[in-house]
Image (cartoon, grey):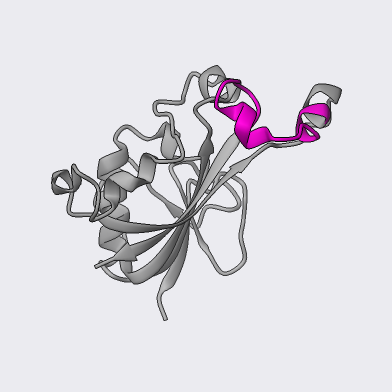
Amino acid sequence: MGIKLNLGCGDKKIFGFIGVDHIKTAAADVIHDLNLAPYPFSADSVDEIIADNVLEHLNDVIAAMEEWHRLCADSAIVRISVPYYKSGGAFTDPTHKHFFTENSFQYFSSEHEYNFYTKAKFKVLKVELKAKDFGDRRHKLRNLLPFKKFFNFWLFNIYDEIYFELECIK
């Protein structure tokens, strides 16, 4: 059985996962800059990766995905949460370097027309748009909006985050 990594863990400790971050926190078991490959783990040693609001901060998404692919065993699961590109929060944080849509990780599929630019292959298992409830009235009303996916085509700030579940293909 392989290891499980919580990449960019910050102060969020998840039972059964090795916390990795570039700063020392109570949740960080391994201190490592995720922009620098190779990470201090063996190839094909990881069964699951959680990357909760970290990928948008890294310098190179493709390089990060290629390193995650190196770490993952075949069929390993990679769970990624990032700000949704139509969310004001995606643009508010000056440390965000990348923006993500529902199709961002299709790039790593064997069926994608530009699949030859990377050897890292992942199958997209799940894509879920999420609207967070920040406790204020505006966000609570937005979460009651009917036909959100329909209105999302034209409007911004209906969803805050996008969650991807990927399977590593070796």
The C terminus lies in quadrant: bottom left
Q: Position of residue 13 (x, y in %)?
A: 62, 56
Task: Looking at this view, name the residue that lies furthest to the bottom.
Answer: 1
Residue for point 68% across, 37% down: 131
Q: Is residue 147 shown above or below 28?
A: above
Q: Position of residue 149 (x, y in %)?
A: 62, 36
The N terminus lies in quadrant: bottom left
**Pick the front one: 19 or 170:** 170
Residue for point 67% across, 34% down: 148
Residue for point 62% across, 50% down: 12
Q: Is residue 77 shown above or below 118?
A: below
Q: Is 128 contained in the magenta span? A: no
Q: Is residue 15 shown above or below 152?
A: below
- Location of residue 125 (image quadrant): bottom left
Classify residue 35 as left or right of residue 3.
Answer: left
**Pick the front one: 105 or 45:** 105
In the rendered structure, which segment of residues is drawn in magenta? 141-159
